[in-house]
Amino acid sequence: MTEKLALEGVEKSFGENRVLTGIDLAVQEHEVVCLIGASGSGKSTLLRCVNLIEPIDAGRIVLSGNRISGPGVNHNDVRRRIGIVFQAFNLFPHMSVLQNVTLAQQRVLGRSRSQAEARAHELLDRFGVGDKHGEYPDRLSGGQQQRVAIVRALAMDPELMLLDEVTSALDPELVGEVLEVIRELAAAGMTMVIATHEMAFARDIASRVCFLDDGVILEQGPPDQIFTAPHEPRTQQFLQRIVAAGRL
Amino acid sequence: MASKGDRRAGPEVAGRSSKLLGGWRAGDGRRGVGIALASTVVFFTVLVVVVTHSPGWPEVRKTFFDWGEFTSSFPEIGRAFLLNVKIFCISEALILVFALLLAVIRSLPGPVFFPLRALAIAYTDFFRGVPTILVIAILGLGAPALQLSWVPTSTTFWGVVSLTLIYSAYVSEVYRAGIESVHPSQEVAARSLGLTRAQGLRHVILPQAVRRVIPPLLNDFIGLQKDTSLVSILGAIEAFNQSEIDVNATFNFTPYLAAAALFVAISIPLARFNDCLAARDRRARELQGVR
């Protein structure tokens, strides 16, 4: 197994607010790592730092053996290799589904229009939104929009996918269809780091679960251990609250 | 963003109140139309009675409302008006491009671009502050006076340059408002796919920004088409100057009204077109749910 992503002592503050206070995390190829933790624990910030949306204050981030944090890094090249999907979909509202999926393929990867469209159709069909290729995003349901957003990221053939609470903005009945897509990606061997509040899903899909608390990974391990026998009192408290809320 | 389904459900577009009719619902129907008609008739009757019974009316009617003067001066003023239209069209095309450039410069992030940003800000501050007529006078009279062989002396040229400089300052602010109205998450999404800042701007941000500011853009252009008459101070024979010539020849002011009629004839369709676009935009937004 080769190491796909490594974070070493990553720190990030927004002004006075220290969001990440020392993150160490290694992700192997084909691994699915789920980040859990309360809102504000730093899950989203961690993903945004990996995709270089936010510059880090200290530490190192390594992708496939190459340092991608700090000076002298081509951000566009790194982002091309890492796909990210957001909670609010962030589709381009002035473009059709097909244009959303082909834009970066053509402009960044230099694929021809027909190549890009072929790849787009293939992925849209695979994830059940093939018939929507001519529609504009506002004509789609939330679940369909999120599937298109996943396809848009996948069309770049990324080495690593980052999913940032991709089901949190969805109506409950639409969550399943998006989780199904992620499950299929995991089965196909995609390396993924997933920030999620869907504990049952994390337990089901993750090769490893990391519990974030106060800007550090307080505890990590196989899902069965984390969810049934967490070592840390803070992890126990967090999971008790989740159970009390009926989410596990 | 919560469920979209319920938001999309049936906005009452058809029953939407019209601004012109002061905001009644379609249900008020016939009675409302009757009241509007009656109050309009009363208003204009009173106005006409007051004006035509004023002590100076016979004199004003002769000097401002002489039909013979109107018809005889109109063709020549109409021809001169083509110069206004020409200045308007050329300036508009240049403004659309130049103002966009200014707006993009002002939106450049980071300390590296500070000098450029500062320059663009100084530019917009300056040209929004100086009266149009002064810019036209200074450039149009000053630049040719340098007597440099490569500097054009055409009044049309300097009229176009002045109007472009001034209106670009206004229009760039309109563009900038549009750029800032596009949610930052759109740029994040574009950059996260590996698009460069310039590619994100061109394919993601600007298309959305420009679409949102078309009504205020058109509004500025309605102002521009009037201001073409200021080029007259350089001596260009456009509609106002031509009417001035006619007035001076006959001591009758009716040619002014002929010129005014031409400007209004252009601006009214522009204004209505603008309303249509705004209404279409509003309907589209209602159908989508507010973002």
Image (spheres, coloured by chain):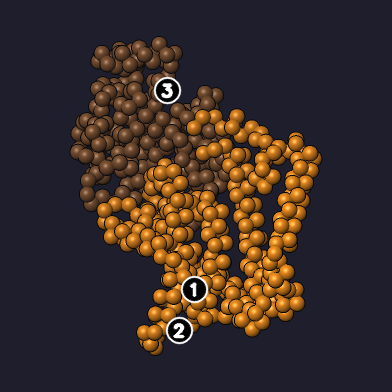
Chain colours: A brown, B orange
Task: Report how many numbered discs are placed on residues in the image.
Answer: 3
Please state the chain letter of the residue tagged with numbered disc 2 in the rendered image.
B
Q: Amino acid at mark 2?
A: Thr
Give the labeled residue for mark 3: A198
Give the labeled residue for mark 1: B160
Disc 3/disc 2 C-alpha distance (Å): 73 Å
Task: Write the residue at 31% across / 59% down.
Answer: B118
Q: Amino acid at mark 3?
A: Glu
- Circle 2 residues within 10 Å: few <14, some 14–19, many ≥20: some
Q: Are marks 3 and 2 on the same chain?
A: no
**Residue B153 tag number:** 2
Task: Write the residue at 41% across / 76% down.
Answer: B139
Q: Are marks 1 and 2 on the same chain?
A: yes
Q: Are marks 3 and 1 on the same chain?
A: no
Describe the element under mark 3 as helix, strand or loop. loop
- Image coordinates of residue A101 in percent, x first then y, are 49, 46
